[in-house]
Each structure stands twice: as C-alpha cells, then as structure tokens.
Image: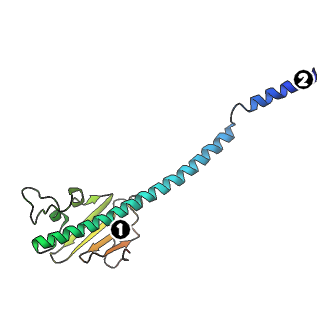
C-alpha cells in the first residue's frame, strides 16, 4: 500500500505542477512579445517614412507639371503655390490656375511642408518633414530644371545637395 500511495502522491504533485505557468515563464513570454513588438513598430515607422518620401517626390513632379501648364498658359512660371491652386473666387487665372489641389497649395501634405519661390522665369520648391525623424528622414529641393535634390538631414535641401537618382 505504501508503494501505491507514493505513486498516487507523485501523480498529484505532477498534476499540480502542470496546471499553469510560473511567474518567471510568463515574464519571459511578455519580454519576448515586447521585443518583437518594438522591432515591428520600428520597421513599420520606417516603411511609413519611405512611403511619405515617395509621395513627396510624386508631389514635386506634380508641381513641375503644373508649372509647365502655367507657363504655357501665362508665359511665365508661378511665383507661389497659391497661383497654381484653386482660385479664391471666380474663374481660373494667373492668381489661381486650379492646377494643384488645395491641400498641397496650402503648403502641407503627407506630413511635409512645401514652399515655393520664383520670379516668373525660374522657380524652386522645397519639401521639409514637419517632424524630422518621425514624418520623414530626407528634405527635398526641385527647381525649374526638374532636377530633384535630397538631403539626409534636417537642413533643407538646395541646388547643391545630392541629386535624387
């Protein structure tokens, strides 16, 4: 009977042990989940920034296209983004050619700030992330030659910055 009793006690002890996880096991699992989550979040943020930067390049190309149409219609380049956007009131004209959407003309789109300068014969556009490092890692510059330049720092890109290839 003692042998039977000891086997029964052993089974009870094993059954008690296998009912759940220990605190250390749970903490290890939580730590692993946190590490995986951190890696996934970082990768996701980098992918978002890359997507925004690609959208900015497309917007710069749209601005160049709008400038080409503006030049064809009015014999000069627009000096500001507002001149390429929807007219304030009335029909399309040199003060509002309706060539770009309002969001871009207002200077902020895709978490980037756009500024444009010009004098009729030339123009330059700069795109800078609203929050460098979280909304974008690069700044961009494009002028009337359609060459896009980039800078991998918070300093705005200019005509002397490396060319985007």
Q: Of the residues tagged 1 and 2, which is closer to the observer?
A: 2
Residues 99 and 154: in front is 99
Q: Please provide percent x and percent y for residue 164.
A: 37, 74
Q: Is residue 96 above or below residue 73?
A: above
Q: Please provide percent x and percent y for residue 42.
A: 49, 56
Residue density around tag 2, few if under 14, some if 14–19, many if 20 or more, within 10 Å: few
148 to the left or right of 46: left
Residue 12 found in image quarter: top right
Q: Which residue is mark 2?
A: 4
Q: Which residue is at a point 31% across and 78% down the rendered structure image?
A: 159
| Disc marking residue 42 | none
Quarter that holds the N terminus: top right
Q: Is residue 78 visible?
A: no
Q: Which residue is at a point 9% across and 64% down the rendered structure image?
A: 93
Q: Is residue 87 visible?
A: yes
Residue density around tag 1, few if under 14, some if 14–19, many if 20 or more, within 10 Å: many
Q: Which residue is at a point 84% across and 28% down the rendered structure image?
A: 10
Q: What is the residue that sits farthest to the left in this orientation?
A: 90
Residue 127 found in image quarter: bottom left
Q: Is residue 119 above or below residue 14?
A: below
Distance, label 1 to label 2, CA atoms, is 79 Å
104 to the left or right of 89: right
Q: Please provide percent x and percent y for residue 106.
A: 22, 58
| Disc marking residue 139 | 1
Residue 103 found in image quarter: bottom left
Q: Please provide percent x and percent y for residue 4.
A: 90, 23
């Amino acid at each position: 009977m003692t042998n039977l009793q000891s086997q029964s006690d052993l089974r009870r002890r094993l059954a008690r042990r296998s009912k759940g996880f220990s605190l250390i096991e749970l903490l290890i699992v939580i730590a692993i989940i946190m590490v995986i989550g951190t890696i996934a979040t970082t990768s996701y943020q980098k992918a978002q920034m890359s997507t925004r930067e690609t959208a900015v390049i497309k917007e710069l190309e749209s601005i160049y296209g709008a400038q080409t149409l503006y030049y064809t219609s009015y014999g000069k380049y627009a000096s500001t983004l507002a001149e390429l956007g929807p007219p304030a009131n009335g029909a399309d004209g040199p003060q509002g050619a309706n060539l770009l959407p309002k969001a871009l003309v207002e200077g902020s789109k895709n978490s980037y700030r756009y500024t444009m300068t010009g004098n009729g014969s030339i123009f330059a556009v700069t795109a800078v992330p609203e929050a460098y490092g979280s909304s974008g890692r690069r700044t961009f510059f494009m002028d009337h030659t359609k060459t896009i330049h980039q800078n991998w720092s918070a300093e705005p890109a200019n005509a002397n910055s490396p060319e985007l290839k």
